[in-house]
Amino acid sequence: MAETMRYEEAQAELERVLRDLEDGTTTLDDALARYERGVQLLRVCYGQLKDAEQKIQQLSGVDDAGKPLLQPLEHVASVTKKGKRAE
């Protein structure tokens, strides 16, 4: 399930996990389970960030030496209907 989460959802849940662990009121078993869930969520976030970075590099192109041209990605699509973007 975590692999299909949006980045923002995974980050929000990860923040809740951290708060749960920091408050010190969980049992050892609960703390271990929350820690494990946090690791899963962290992997989801890192994976999505890595994918986004690679996509930006691909969209930016390369120079004559083959080095990536790292330029900010300008987002121009807008949402027209729930969950669908305009091209």
Image (spheres, grey):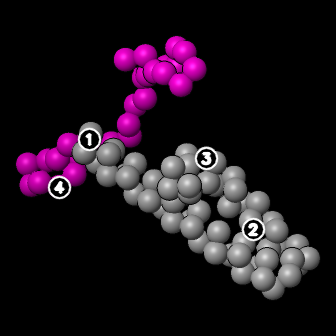
Mark 1 = which residue? Answer: 60
Q: In terms of secondary structure, where does tag 3 sit?
A: helix
Q: In this view of the protein, which residue sits in the foreground, 6 or 29?
A: 29
Assess whether residue 29 is covered by the magenta stretch: no
Q: Residue at image x 65%, y 69%?
A: 37
Asked if the magenta segment contains residue 76, the reply would be yes
Q: Which residue is mark 4?
A: 67
Residue 86 on image: x %, y %: 43, 16
The answer to which of 10 and 55 lies nearer the viewer is 10
The percent position of residue 34, horizontal first and vertical second, equals 72, 72
Element assignment for label 4? loop
Amino acid on which the number 4 mark rests in the picture: Lys
Is disc 3 surrounded by few (<14), some (14 to 19) or many (20+) residues within 10 Å?
few
Task: Say what amino acid the circle numbered 2 marks.
Answer: Leu
Q: Residues under labels 4 and 2: Cα distance?
A: 39 Å
Q: Is residue 35 left or right of residue 70?
A: right
Q: Which residue corresponds to mark 2? A: 18
- The residue lying toward the viewer, choosing from 50 and 10, is 10
The magenta segment is 60-87
Q: Which residue is mark 3?
A: 8
Question: In front of the other: label 3 or label 1?
Answer: 3
Asked if residue 49 can be seen in this view, the reply is no
Tag 2, which secondary structure?
Answer: helix
Q: CA distance from mark 3 to mark 1?
A: 24 Å
Residue 75 locus on image (x, y percent): 43, 29
Q: Position of residue 70 (x, y in %)?
A: 30, 48
Instruction: Depth check: give the residue in front, 66 or 51.
Output: 51
Q: Foreground mark, 4 or 2?
A: 2
- Residue depicted at x 26% and y 41%: 60
Among the two numbered marks 2 and 3 on one chain, the one whose residue lies closer to the N terminus: 3
